[in-house]
Image: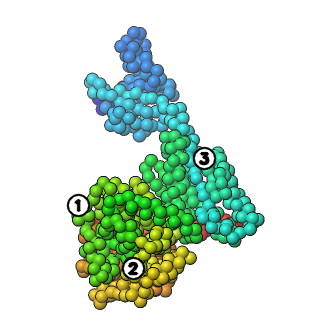
Amino acid sequence: MDRKPRFILEVYTIGLLALCVILTALLAVVEIRLLWVLVPLLALLALGLFFSGRSLRRTIARQARCADFENSPAQFTLGALPLPVALLRGKTLVWYNEPFLHLLLEDEERLLAPVNKVLPGLELRQCAEPSGQVLEHGGRKYNIFASNGKDQLTALYLVDETDLRHQAAEYAASRPAYLLIEIDGYAEQVAGLKDSEKARLLEGVNRVLETYIGRTTGFLRRVSNARYIAVVEERHMKEMVAAKFDVLDKVRALDGEVGVTLSIGVGRGGATLRQCEEMARQSLDMALGRGGDQAAVKTPEGFAFYGGVSRSVEKRSRVKSRIVASALSDLISQADSVLIMGHRMSDLDCIGAAIGVLRICKGLDVPAAIVVRREATLAQSILNECDKAGLGEDFIPPDVALDGITPKTLLVVVDTHIKGILESGEVYQKCRQVAVIDHHRKAVGHIDNAVLFFHEPYASSTCELVSELLQYVDQDKVRPTSLEAEALLAGIMLDTRNFALHTGVRTFEAAAYLRRVGAMTERVKLLFNSSLQEYTVKSNLVENADIYMGCAVSVSGELPPGMAVAVPQAANDLLTIEGVGASFVAVQQGSGVNISARSMGAVNVQVIMEHLGGGGHLTMAGAQMRDTTIDEAEQKIRAAIAQYRADQKRAAQEEAAGKAAAKE
């Protein structure tokens, strides 16, 4: 009776009726004439039980629920509550109040019924939690709480939160998101255009943006020739994110003399509109720092990026370089010592740029040194040349650098801006003043306390930026030697692959300056020579490559000591294979995997490497995956390539659709 009393009661009733049928049959055997009297009586009894059973159960239910008892304890406690309440024994309804009867049962008595038939999906354990359980019943949403009482009874309290949750959902959907929109490189883009052409270009951008924002309940305002602000509701921001900001493709598809692209910074989820505006500014800086033609969205949880499929717009003006050179000279002059540091597994661009900054420090008579781990570098050739020239003391390991840091030590970070991949995180943490010089696309986790942040993603290399800075400091005091000029030129040649990729006018101007101060191209070429063992390892990596969706993928176990330089070399050589748009070389390194990625520009390897926790540039990127086997790394690389190709195909379709719509 405790577990299923209503079911057992029905069984007893049916059993009694069956017993009556059997007795009637026995009497009929004794006297057949009695059958004519007993059968109609038995039929009337069955019909009576059938029609009166429901009424009887309702009467019993009203009695059990104390509905007919005035001043009962139940009536003064649970029965008097305005919200629906029910008592359970196990999972069976044994009592409920009038609101429960009217709202949940629609005035149908369900006493002794299983609670899961009345409230499908009810979980008593979840209801016992402080947050309760939210269930929808009859078009209303109830938050159900449970408490255990005496005699194994459980009380259910149902709080109607339909209106409250509707208001909360509407509040969340109507929260404002702030957008800052900027035309990439506007000054450079329109420099040679006529006024009518400028007006036509801006008219096309305005039309696309007005249509894009006009589909929402927000507004768009143009605040300058190249910048717009917009505020939209969160419900529409979700749609924009789901469409991956297709407005970028529509603007890129505009017909004109120049290819126009947008950078969008979004702040959403802030406590106030001002906070969203600050987040949007940070997002726009991030989008521009990553090369433009993309949207960066910042929420309290972090950044998300969309787009970024085209090249950066080269800036021809050197005004910023002149200003940075002056500021950097002042910082160096005010310091009592300078440390110059790059990223882990430093390459020729990193060491070359560090040597250029070291020359500025020497010219200003400020003690300086380059922090590098000689046992873990890809630029051993230039370090060997410096040792032969008697400059070996200019390079010190991180532990030695830590001992010499003072409150007035300046740390100059070159060829990276990400904290997590610095040569030494301890050196960075101990230095109070930090300056950054880098050309890689901006990524999450960047150095955010720099007093000077010279970051230009349009540049081919960090050595190009440092070469420009050298031209704007005192030429009588700061003139690089031929070896220093060759180190800088080697860095430029490495990142441009002998001036074949990612070069601009300023790249060749920097190379001409270095040649003018004594760099010999034949000696620079010797810095790229490799040993027979390195060549053999590189050849094996190339031979083991597999072509996947137009990309060469090569994986390998751990390499012999000192052979790490073969990894980027193999990635470069794989690009010479016909039909290969990008290359990915992954090797096991202890418990992790190091990945080197290269492309000819058609594939943005930086976007692909970001999916694997790395970063870099459009044509050159990498990643370091921890606690990963080489097989797992290969699967993740292929998945990232497939995702990139899918996004690339979608962008091409939308661009084609945009051009077709523009023609119509």
| Quarter residue 623 falls in | bottom left
Q: Earlier in the sequence, mark 2 or mark 3?
A: 3
> Is residue 47 shown to the viewer in this render?
no
Instruction: Bin the neighbour count of mark 1 within 10 Å (Cα to Cα): few under 14, some 14-19, many 20 and up.
Output: few
**With 311 as the anchor, is 536 left or right in this view?**
left
Mark 2 to mark 1: distance in Å? 29 Å
Indicate the quadrant containing the N terminus: top left, top right, bottom left or bottom right: top left
Nearer to me, 596 or 342:
342
Instruction: Give the residue type at disc 1.
Output: Asp
Helix, strand or loop for disc 2: loop
Percent coordinates x, y for residue 404 in the rendering: 25, 61
Q: Earlier in the sequence, mark 1 or mark 3?
A: 3
The disc label shown at residue 231, or none: 3
Instruction: Give the residue type at disc 2.
Output: Thr
Q: Which residue was labeled with disc 1? A: 403
Mark 1 to mark 3: distance in Å? 51 Å
Q: Which residue was labeled with disc 2? A: 481
